[in-house]
Amino acid sequence: MTFRELYNIFAKHKDGQWIMKLDNAYQLYQFAKENNIKRVLGLGTGIGLSDAVIALALLEKGEKDFLIDSLEQNEKCINIANGLIPQELKGYINIHKTEVKVWNTEHIPYQYFSNYKTLPNSEYDLIINDGPSPFMEGDKYVDLPNGTIHEMLINGKIKDGTKIIYDGRVQSFGILERYFSGNFQLIKVPKRGNDFNVIEKIGDLKIGDDKLDMMKNFTTYFK
């Protein structure tokens, strides 16, 4: 099966409008082939495209000993993913049903996030941040930036060298840059008009506020 054949399986589904763009999916495919990846955490299964793309890429380069843990809050998405992911890739993908919580931390004041409640107990070479999606809390529609990466980082759950991909999720990525910039290096610069960012975890935990520092030190805003 080729990358394009795999992509078309998902794109042709009636819910295919929610999958990542073709260019971003191909960047993910190439990135998986070019890097040493054995354990993957997918935050947001959706209908299963990103997990299938990574599995295909790793198999094509000869990897056999790898595993993808994929988290999803919606039973509907899990059922679709299980129906669409080709059989030869399914053995490498574990989809975990998990609930979503509203989370905040004193390190990022006045900001709330939507995070997954439970995570597999493992270390990962690659994490894809693409969820949770908005959800209903009673009769309220909750649409918050994703903060599972932030929580994992604060709790020491991301090892040095772990690559993290943000496919969109611009608000959440911006918050990560603002408060945790000292913990990552950008290793793949997005193309113009693109929102596919790849960063790598480096060093011990450092928490600051880059925006506040800039406003204090480089402008007269507070003076």
Image: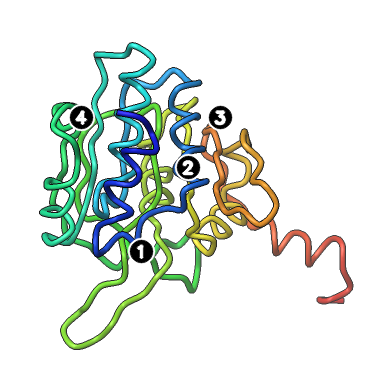
Q: Which residue is mark 1?
A: 17
Residue visible at 40% across and 49% down in the picture = 129
Query: Any mark on residue 89, and which?
Result: 4
Residue sitting nearer the eye, 135 or 192: 192
Q: Secondary structure at mark 2?
A: strand
Q: Residue at x 35, y 62 (%)?
A: 18
Closer-to-camera residue (222/53)? 53
Amino acid type shown at disc 2: Ile
Label 4 to label 1, Cα distance in Å? Answer: 22 Å
At horizontal 56% and vertical 38% (from top left) the residue drawn is: 199
Q: Amino acid at mark 1?
A: Gln
At mark 1, the secondary structure is helix
User: In the displayed structure, would residue 113 be above or below residue 129?
Assistant: below
Query: Amino acid type of disc 4?
Result: Leu
Disc 1 to disc 3, C-alpha distance: 38 Å
Q: Which residue is mark 2?
A: 165
Sort mark 2 into few (<14), some (14-19) or many (20+) by Cα contacts within 10 Å: many
Alpha-carbon span between mark 1 and mark 2? 20 Å
Sequence-wise first label, 2 or 3: 2
Q: CA distance from mark 2 to mark 3?
A: 18 Å
First in sequence, mark 1 or 2: give its number.
1
Please name the amino acid that badge 3 sits on: Gly
